[in-house]
Amino acid sequence: MSVDSTVTNIPAFFITVPAAIIVSREIIVSALREWMADLGKRAKVAVSYLGKVKTAVQMCALTVLLFCDNGTNAFIVLAGYLLLYIAAVLTIWSMLIYLNMVWIEIK
């Protein structure tokens, strides 16, 4: 079964939004880690289990989406999009956890 035309015509917006969320989180968390390291409290923003799960889901999504071409089954393409959105949700969740840890430290 080839890709349905509705799957191949998905606007770039639907990949751009989760990608922007993921990239933004990486920049924010990296900045937090550097800032906390300057304060001598880098351990407060150590890598969390949720961050590792987020990375695993994100890598699976990217692998699936990079594998897809015009002959890929629509289910696989949609699974790649679903994984990407799950990664984006986990990204926001893990970022909020990091921000909470830093907020507690700032207070």
Image: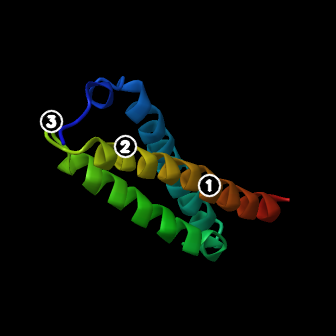
Question: Mark 2 or 1, which is nearer the eye?
Answer: 2
- The kind of residue tagged 3 is Asn
Looking at the image, tell me whether mark 3 or mark 2 is earlier in sequence order.
3
Q: Label 3 to label 2, Cα distance in Å?
A: 13 Å
Tag 3, which secondary structure? loop
Please identify the quadrant where the C terminus is shown.
bottom right
Q: CA distance from mark 3 to mark 1?
A: 35 Å
Q: Residue 55: image x %, image y %?
A: 43, 63
The residue that disc 3 covers is: 70
Q: Amino acid at mark 2?
A: Leu
Label 2 residue SS: helix
The residue pinned by badge 2 equals: 78
**Marks 3,1: beta carbons within 8 A:** no
Is 5 displayed left or right of 97 in the figure?
A: left
Q: Which mark is residue 95?
A: 1
Q: Observer-nearest residue: 6 or 13?
A: 6
Residue drawn at the location 62% of the way across and 68% of the way down: 45
Query: Mark 2 or mark 1, which has the lower sequence index?
Result: 2
Residue 48 is at least partly visible in this image? no
Question: Can see residue 90?
Answer: yes
Q: Is residue 105 above or below residue 65?
A: below
Packing grade of label 2 (10 A; few <14, some 14-19, many >=20) is some
Residue 57 lies, in percent from the top left, at 43, 61
Answer above or below: position of 54 versus 61. below
Tell me where residue 9 appears, x and y as whole percent. 29, 23
Q: CA distance from mark 2 to mark 1?
A: 26 Å
